[in-house]
Image: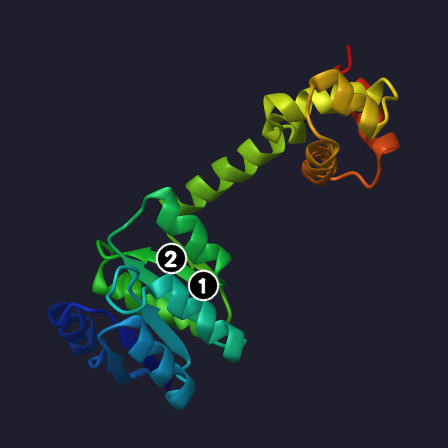
């Protein structure tokens, strides 16, 4: 028997989903919660096989609840069940460790099927969400690290590539030595390099040095 916890702030949603799942021979709804905080507490208390989690709720949203549940109970399996498909909801939910992401437009049979797959350790994600994730991955691969540099940081990088010391950069750009050190630290961090030499090599490789 697959033990399920429902976390949703809409009573009618919980009632509808619970009513359908109660008709399934292999699924048992062992608890309900009206917000993320209660859901978090009940998840750790009841240890269900699968948690159906809404996103937008008072007191604690579904994303934060998912993070906290998985922090304290790494084996938890959470399916996000929501009306939202916008990027600021999808990516944080997946990054939080959710095992699945379904829309509330899914049929009851699809939800039950997703619960069964999740209980077996499979990831269940809506095709449109998968497409969004793949597009984001492709975008991240296409982007270059230097695109995150500010105009001032690019200037500092160019001077680093020319072999300027921090004091010389400060004199050249009419800024304080402390400010230069901050910019240099930011440049190294954003370019994911360990020292000024690697930063200079990066600058010439990407034709950023003049």
Left or right, 54 with respect to 136, comes to: left
Left or right, 179 with respect to 133, comes to: right
The residue nearer to you, when weighing 108 against 58, is 58
Q: Quadrant of residue 206?
A: top right
Vertical arrangement, residue 66 with respect to residue 84, above or below: below
Where disc 1 sits, the SS reads: loop
Residue occupying image coordinates x 37% and y 86%: 1
The residue under label 1 is 98
Q: CA distance from mark 1 to mark 2?
A: 7 Å
Q: Residues within 10 Å of mark 1 (few under 14, many from 20)?
A: many
**One can see residue 193 in this view:** yes
Please state the total of marks drawn on the protein image: 2
Name the spot of residue 53 as percent of width and height, x first.
32, 68
Residue occupying image coordinates x 43% and y 40%: 132
Q: How is the image coloured?
A: rainbow
Q: Quadrant of residue 103?
A: bottom left
Vertical arrangement, residue 150 with respect to residue 69, above or below: above
The residue nearer to you, when weighing 11 against 173, is 173
Vertical arrangement, residue 81 with respect to residue 139, above or below: below
The residue nearer to you, when weighing 34 against 166, is 166
Q: Are marks 1 and 2 in contact (CB under 8 Å)?
A: yes
Left or right, 168 with respect to 40, comes to: right
User: What is the number of the mark on residue 101?
Assistant: 2
């Amino acid at each position: 028997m697959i033990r399920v916890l429902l976390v949703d702030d809409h009573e009618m949603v919980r009632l509808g989903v619970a009513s359908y799942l109660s008709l399934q021979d292999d699924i048992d709804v062992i608890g309900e919660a009206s917000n993320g905080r209660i859901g978090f507490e009940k998840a750790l208390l009841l240890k269900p096989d699968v948690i159906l989690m809404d996103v937008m709720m008072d007191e604690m949203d579904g994303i934060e609840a998912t993070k906290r549940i998985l922090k304290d109970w790494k084996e938890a399996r959470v399916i996000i069940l929501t009306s939202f498909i916008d990027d600021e909801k999808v990516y944080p939910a997946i990054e939080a460790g959710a095992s699945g992401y379904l829309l509330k437009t899914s049929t009851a049979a699809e939800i039950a099927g997703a619960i069964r797959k999740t209980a077996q350790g499979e990831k269940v994600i809506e095709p449109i969400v998968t497409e969004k994730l793949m597009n984001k991955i492709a975008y991240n691969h296409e982007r270059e690290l230097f695109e995150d540099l500010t105009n001032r940081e690019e200037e500092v990088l160019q001077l680093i590539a020319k072999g300027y010391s921090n004091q010389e950069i400060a004199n050249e750009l009419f800024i304080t030595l402390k400010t230069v050190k901050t910019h240099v630290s930011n440049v190294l961090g954003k370019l994911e390099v360990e020292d000024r030499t690697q930063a200079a090599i990066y600058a010439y490789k990407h034709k950023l040095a003049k």
